[in-house]
Structure formats: structure tokens, C-alpha cells
Amino acid sequence: IRVVAEDPAGNTAESPRLLVTIDTSTFIDNPAMVAGSDNGIFSNDSITSQTRPTFSISGEMNQSVQIFIDGVLVDTITVTDRNQVYRPESPLGDGSHSIYYVITDKAGNTATSKTLNFTIDTFNTTPVAIDSIGGQTLAEMTGSDGKIYITDTTRNLLFSGSAEPNSKIEIIINGLNVGEVWVNEKGHWQMPVNPLYFTEGQLDITVKSTDRAGNVNQEKYSIWVDTHIQVFTSEIDDNKSSSKTDWWSNSSTITMRGMGEIGATVSLIVAGVTLATAVVAANGQWELSTDQLPEGKYDITLSIEDNAGNRKEEVHEIFIDRTPPNAPVVTYSDIVNDLIIMQGTAEAKSQLIITDSNGNTYTLTVPDNGKWSMAIPYPSEGKFTITSVDAIGNRSDDVSLDIMKEVPVISLSPDSDSGTVGDNITRDKQPTFIIGNLESDVVVVQVDINGTVYNAEKNADGVWFFTPGTPLADGSYTISVIASDAAGNQKNSLPITVTIDSTLTVPEIALAAGEDNGVSDSDNVTNHTQPKFTLQHIDADVTGVTVNVTHNGVTDTYQATQGADGWTFTPPAAWNDGTYTLSVTVVDRAGNSQQSASLAVTVDSTVTVTADSQHDDASDDATATAVTPPESETVNAE
């Protein structure tokens, strides 16, 4: 505005200009929480976890703005920027708040923004929990080992739980987000989860609660999915049945074992009563024993229940038989070619076990009629143990059979058989007898001599022998032996005849008649160069007659001969003149020997003539040689 003055003369004058502003209004935009501060689930809900959130301010430039929080003037600023913001100087507490602006321009115009209600929420402390899965509480899902188990994955599983009201729930399984749901105003939530997420084994499940301010609270769970018994095997110790499913036993304590899930409980159930339990060990093996199973055939149940509550059962037919069969009846009928024919009766279809004293074992299955027979090689001692074993393994009492097959043999000891070995003729009046062909279990051996019985002995080498304690008189004896074993079996030997002959007549030797032909017929001088001798007093049982002839220090032995005229000896060659000493030796079949007295015989087959010498060329003596006188004549040489 300016003023112009004009006088009458027409002169004008102008005043300085005056700037006058007409301002009748002002403006201020409504406050809004900027994007960085509206940090909750939603970016436009004015809910934040920041205690000093930032708000936008937009109004008439260069004008003064009053800021009211919760109705209280907290600050005054000047608008200097179209994108100006405001952040409280002091933190705001959790809860609901409001903010508005009042702008006053220089003309005194004022304007008030709308009130912005906002929420400060800096924590989410309401516990996050799963209350149930699939309609079962976690307590109901907790196994015997304290773990939480899901045992049914055939349908969607509804997870239910609690958390901060109006927060968002996320379920994360093994790192995979499987779904989201809002918590209602009462703090409850439910969400179905597809069963495809539930694989067998351990699951790491996180339930995450995020409130609208973005505060997070979560709870982690380890849950195991175990929908079935993965392994369960069973067997009985020493099953006597050929079937793996049918069990036979004769034990007083029955032991069962097998494989199963670690930590699972195996129960033995009979007629609805649990008799024994076992827990599967860390190596997957289980074992249980019971002594409460009665005799008979019936069904038993083996049940396994794992920690998750899964169950599986096996039913077995069991046959308990602890009653042994009756002892077999055993006889024997004959021994043929070292085979004993054994027979008898025993429990039908049982196994007959025959063990001999050599340790050999023979078996047979008893026929349905219970009668049996078997040919078995005869052992060294003739002992047998026979046992019946039924199909389930019960053993009868042992039956012992002790037989003696071998017939003893008695013979003269070679040292006592003084004559021809084997002829049982001896000069030994206390001969030793050897008893052989005895079975090794013989304990008593007796020798019968003409009806008188004596006990034999056994030497350190195990050989039985007998030597009479007193000398036997000469003569023949019938001798046999009786062998007895510990079982009372006896065998008699065949008798032998033994002759005791301890005497022999002393023989004599003499020139035969007509051989002693010198001057005297008793001077044992003969001119025969092969004289004949007669041997007298020769017993009939002699087996050897020899003549010993000694001449000039040399002794020769000749066999005498026996003819119709008795025993004689004639030198096999002519003897030279001289003296010969003869004796005869006789030996009988018992080995007795006698020698005659010596006989000195002179052979003189030449004549010596002595005469005076009549001629100078003649020798002093003359000798006639080989002059044989005529029979019955005497010739004198002169």
C-alpha cells in the first residue's frame, strides 16, 4: 500500500510503499509413523517396538508447530522442510499413545492436525506352547523314556497351543516353515500340519510367536515320530523242534532272546498273565528267562512295546516236557563174528544211544512198536551204557550192560615148559602158567588144578600168571582157568593137561657081549676097533641118547641108536689102539637129563713079539703086526 498527494498546482508526492499481507488461515498435515519406525508385522498399523518412533511433519513452511503426545505439549519446532520428521527426545513407555500437532502462523492463524493413536510394544513374553497334537496332550504323547512321540501320521495333525494374543504363530519343522496362524484374542491358536512333514525319527520343531510390534518369542521341541515297531525277532534257547515258530523245551528255566528296538519292553504273556519282561539293550538285543512255564503244549505271547507305545505281538506254540522216558529194557541174544546182537524195548520214536567201553557211540530210532535191535562191534571190556532220549531231549536213566565174550586161555610159561615147548610136559614141579585172552576189565582169575582152585596174580605189566605155592608131584594134571569181571560175568577156559616129570633113570654103558674079548671078559679090553656097546636103564620117555667118547683129550659126541635089542652104540669108524672113555647122556621129554658113569675101554688090535738077535744084520727085536689069532686059539710067539 502507498499514498499519493497532489496540490492544487498539480504537484504530487508519493509515500513509501507499505507491504501488507492478508493471511486468514494456515495448515498442518496429520502425523504419520514413518516406515522405519512402523516396524511390526504391518507397516501401516502404527504399532512399533521402538520407544522413540519417528513421525512425519508437513505444514506451512517456517511456521511454529507445537507437538502434543498423550495431550501434553512436549516440543515446539519450526517447519523448515517438506519432509521434516519428529522423534521424541525421551523414550515412551509400552502401551497406547497419541500424537497431534498445532501450527500457528505469523498472522496468528492456527491449525490442529488429527490425533494419531499409536502403540509402543517392546516385548513378547507370553509363553509359547504346544498344548496338544492330533488331540493328544504332550503328556499323553510322552513315552516311557520321557520323549514326546507322534505315533500316527495317517492324517493331518492339528497342533494346538497358546501364545500372546493376536500374535502370529509359525511352525518350523527341521528348519522348514510348514505354516502360519494368528493367535486369537484369548491367546489360543490351532494349525493343521500335513503328515508328509513327519518322517520317522527325531523332529526339531520350533513354534515362533511374532506380535504386531515385531517382538518374537519362541519355544523349541524335540519330537520323535515312531509309528510302528521296526524290528522284533524272537527265539528260544536250545529249541528241540525243527520249526522256528513252534518251540519245544525240556529245561526247567526257559530262556528266550531276540532283537528289538532299543529301550523297548518285551513281555512274556501266558493266559493273560505277564510272567517275565526284558528291556532291549543298547545293542538291540533282549533276553528273558522264566521258570514258571508248566509242562504241556499251549500258546505263549511275546509282546514288545516301544517307548512311543507302539506294540507288536508274536504267538508261539510251546511244548514243555521235562519228564524223562522210562529206562530201556536191554538183552542180548548172541555174539557173532565179534558182533553182539543187542535187543530190547524202549519208548517209541525215542532215540536210543548206546555207548561202549571204548567210547564209541551208536544210535537208532526206536520203531513205533517200541521194539529195537542192533548189532554192535564188541568192545575191549564188553561194557555198554544204553540211554533212551525222547524227541524233546529228556534222557532216561542209563542202563548198563556188561558182557564177557573172550574165553581165557592158560598155558605153560615158556620158561617152565622144560621139554619140547608146547607139549605141556615139564620137569618143573612149581611151573608158572600164563593166562591170556582176558578182557581188560577182568578182576579175578582162578586156576583149577584137578578140582582145586587157586587165585592167579597180575604182574606189573598187566599179565595174569599162576605159580603153585608148593611143588606138584609127578603126574598128569587137568588145569583150567576161570576169569571173572566186576559185573560177575565168568568165562572158563578149555582145560589143558600138564605132565610133571621130574625124574629120569641114570643110564649105564657097557661093552656088548663078545666085545670084551681079551684074556678077561670083564677087563674092558678089546681088539675090536669098532666095538659095540649096549646102553642100559634107558627110560621109555627119553627123547635123546648121546654117547660122549674122549680119546687123547678130545671128546666126540655120537647119537645112540635104538633097535630090537635095545639101545646100542658102535663107533662109526675104526678106532686106533688106545684107551677110550665113554659116557652116555639121556634127556627125556620133560627136559630131565642124566649121565652115566664113565666107562674106560682099551682097544688093542696088535701083537708084539720079542726074540734074541742071531745075526749081525738083524735088529735087536722083531715085531709082528696085524697078527689075528684064529677063533678059540691062542698063539704064543717064541
Image (spheres, grey):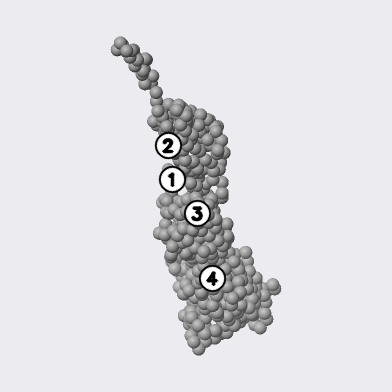
Q: Earlier in the sequence, mark 4 or mark 3?
A: 3
- At label 4, the amino acid type is Leu
Contact flag, marks 3 and 1 (Cβ < 8 Å): no
Question: In the depicted view, which residue is nearer to us: 174 or 465?
Answer: 174
Outermost residue toward the left?
10
Above or below, 23 relative to 621: above
Which residue is identified by label 4?
302
Q: Earlier in the sequence, mark 4 or mark 2?
A: 2
Q: Quadrant of residue 289?
A: bottom right
Q: Secondary structure at mark 4?
A: strand
> Which quadrant would the N terminus be assigned to in this image?
top left
Mark 1 closeness class: few <14, some 14–19, many ≥20 residues within 10 Å: some
Above or below, 614 relative to 65: below
Question: In the depicted view, which residue is nearer to us: 331 or 371?
Answer: 371
Mark 2 closeness class: few <14, some 14–19, many ≥20 residues within 10 Å: some
Which residue is identified by label 3?
183
Look at 61% across and 74% down and name the residue there.
273
Above or below, 155 relative to 212: below
Distance between mark 2 and mark 3 Cα atoms: 35 Å
Q: How far from the left and from the top, in percent, is residue 214?
A: 48, 44
Q: Secondary structure at mark 3?
A: loop
Distance between mark 4 and mark 3 Cα atoms: 47 Å
- At label 2, the amino acid type is Asp
Which residue is identified by label 1?
42
Q: Earlier in the sequence, mark 1 or mark 4?
A: 1
